[in-house]
Amino acid sequence: MIITISGVPGSGKTSVAKIVAERLGLPFYSVGDFRGQMAMDRGMTIDELNALGETDKSTDTLADNYQKRLGKNGDDFVIEGRLSWHFIPRSFKVFLDCALQESARRVFSSHHERPDEAKRDSIEDVRTELDARMASDKRRYAAIYGVDYMDKNHYDLVVDTTSLKSAQETAEKVLAALPPSAS
């Protein structure tokens, strides 16, 4: 089974995907890490790479092709990425939601873990950046693919992580929702 995990920044996509992959004994892939490395290789932050992507779709093409190859060549893995559900339609599609203020708090408290993200001085600065990032993603994805990753109708499972205490708790919800053949 292929499980795609999408969602808003700070919702726990990467942490949850890693836990789910480990529990199921499946490989884990991260489009966020892939794009983050692309940004750093170009001497940019992820937000700068995303802004460039609004006029230069090649910044998305590498990540898109990476996901398409994984979906075509693999049968059992977990991948986190905002558009993974789109590029790997034969997956169990999960969306992790989170209130913007809580997302900002989480990203701010973990900013030292992400070398591809610009450092911000306050949670409000992070909130402003996240709002801009989500708007940029929405514009890019609508222009390039004609999709809205925030439309929850695309997903088999939607989990609001705002009040959940840990990525483990979120992962348990995902694991409990999987079809019986997957778990």
Image: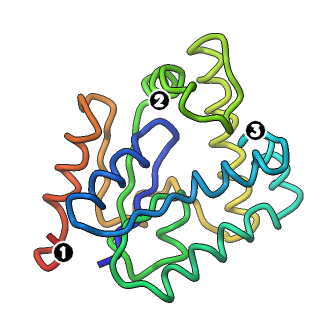
Mark 3, secondary structure of its residue: loop
Report crowding for label 1: few under 14, some 14 to 19, many 20 or more residues within 10 A (C-alpha): few
Helix or strand or loop: what does disc 1 sit on?
loop
Q: Nearer the viewer, residue 164 or 116?
A: 116
**Rendered location of residue 168, percent (x, y):** 22, 41
Drawn side of residue 70 relative to residue 50, left or right: left
Query: In the rendered image, which residue does mark 1 sit on?
Result: 182
Separation (CA) of disc 1 from disc 3: 36 Å
Quarter of the image with the N terminus in it:
bottom left
Q: What residue is shown with label 2? A: 103
Residue in front for this viewpoint, 148 or 96: 96
| 131 relative to 27, above or below | above
Residue reaching furthest to the bottom: 73
Residue 47 is left or right of residue 19, and the answer is right
Residue sitting at x 65%, y 35%: 115
Looking at the rendered structure, the secondary structure element under dot 2 is helix
Q: Earlier in the sequence, mark 1 or mark 2?
A: 2
Q: Identify the residue at horizontal 46%, vertical 49% (top origin).
A: 7
Which residue carries the number 3 mark?
Answer: 45
Tell me where residue 3 sits by quadrant.
Answer: bottom left
Residue type at numbered disc 3:
Thr
Instruction: Give the amino acid type for the residue marked by disc 1 in the picture.
Output: Ala
Q: Amino acid at mark 2?
A: Ser
Please state, as top left, top right, bottom left or bottom right, where the C terminus lies in the image: bottom left
Labels 3 and 2 touching (C-beta < 8 A): no
Q: Residues within 10 Å of mark 2 (few under 14, many from 20)?
A: many
Mark 1 vs mark 3: which is more N-terminal? 3
Mark with earlier residue (3, 2): 3
The Cα–Cα distance between marks 1 and 2, rounded to whole angstroms, is 29 Å
| Callout in the foreground (3, 2) | 3
